Amino acid sequence: MHNPGDILSQRYRIEEQLGQGGFGTVYKARDRTNNRVCAVKENTENDPSARKQFEREASILKGLRHQNFPEVFNFFVEPNSQQYIVMEFVKGDNLRTLVQQQGALPESQVLGWMDQICDALAYLHHHNVIHRDVKHANIIITPTGRAVLVDLGIAKIYDPQNPLTPTTAGSRIGTPGFAPLEQYTGGTGPCSDVYAVGATLYFCLTGQVPPDALLRANVSPPTPLVPPRQLNPKISLDMEAFILKTMAMPKNDRYQTMQEVRGVLDAIQGGKPPPGTRFTGTIQQLGRPGLYSSGYSRRHYSFLLVTQTGTKMPCELKGYLLPLVLFNGASVTVDGAFDGNNVLQVTKLTDLQTQRGWTPKPTLGRWEQLKIELGLMKP
């Protein structure tokens, strides 16, 4: 523990303590050689594995050149063997503090910040490093709106050719509620940070920390993840779908890369659901072929879907006959992408009563498709 006025490495004068955790303390200090304000992180754990991990953090940070990571200026060890990292002092509040002060934050505001963080993570993953501790307390928002991701204390060097490479012995697990299940059991990779991004968004938009992954998986009965719109109805349907996918327990059910994540966030910011968004609802009206298309086509079939939230959505199927089991009032799910006329071009349709699904078969004619639906011809 250091007090204001203490001098480290005959150079850094402590001004105040900024924060303290179980494994380190961060101070605001001033570099007497250039009068620059900086942040000094002290390792408070002296066992060999902790010291090695602290050195790894310093090494990783020194190699980063990204505006959404703090710049590292120095790493040194005092005569008493205490380790220190000197880095850029980032002025601002972290997301945990902002939510504590303001409550659940507006989606449009959080989207911009998280897009910056995902860009930083994409850069990190490109260099085969997994952060493993993305959370509300590790994202600082500056007065200019810059989002900065800090604390690589439990980062892992990742080998894409051997994704099950074990984490360094003695390394810390992460933060309950933000760490995915594989962070407890082994096999972390880029989609582990994807889970943490979703958990951070969940907290920012609802004001509540999601249940820990262990509670979601290993207790009987498991603790459910409450859909975020039940806690904050102002959250958009697209954002809720995004969060639930990023926080899927089986890691193969999540987005696998930060590039995918950023593409979906960009689509949400643009006001359109991203490709593949699923809608559940009831068919209110079957349209004649080509009702929403430019020009008549035997292969275009349209209907009006009334979603569970009451939204009326024009949909269009292309390339096959509308399944005969569907009629007004049928409950279905549809997957697809919106075109320039805000019509959902359906890429998959599922009848919820029969649990049977259909996908476009553009090479088939109308009568061939009709035979398939009647069971007279194999697809």
Image (cartoon, rainbow, N blue to C red):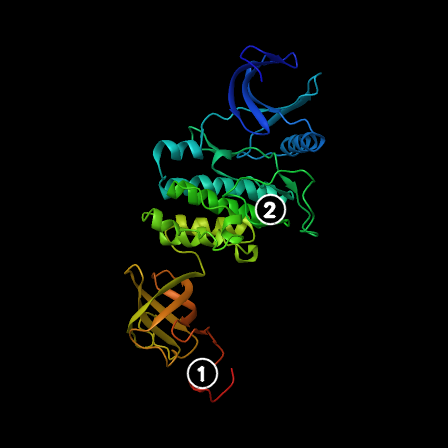
As drawn, which residue projects farthest toward the front?
Answer: 220
Q: Decide: is 13 above or below 161.
A: above
Q: CA distance from mark 2 to mark 1?
A: 49 Å
Which label number is shown at residue 369? 1
Out of 143 and 47, give the one closest to the viewer: 47
Q: In the rendered view, does 229 fall on the left or right side of 176?
A: left
Taking depth in this image into account, of 146 and 246 the one nearest to the observer is 246
Which of 306 and 313 lies nearest the eye of the viewer?
Answer: 306
Instruction: Give percent across and percent down for residue 143.
Output: 42, 28
Pointer 2 residue: 184
Badge 1 marks a residue whose secondary structure is helix
Give residue 137's position: percent from left, percent from top: 48, 34
SS category of the residue bearing label 2 = helix
What residue is drawn where x is 62% and y is 49%? Answer: 185
What is the three-letter code of the residue carrying label 2? Tyr
Q: Residue at x 48, y 81 (%)?
A: 364
Give the percent coordinates (x, y) of residue 300. Answer: 38, 75
Q: Amino acid at mark 1?
A: Gln
Nearer-the-camera pick, 373 or 48: 48
- Mark 2, mark 1: which one is toward the viewer? 2
370 shown above or below 255: below
Residue lying at the far top in this picture: please name it: 5
* Residue 177 horizontal side relative to residue 229, left or right: right
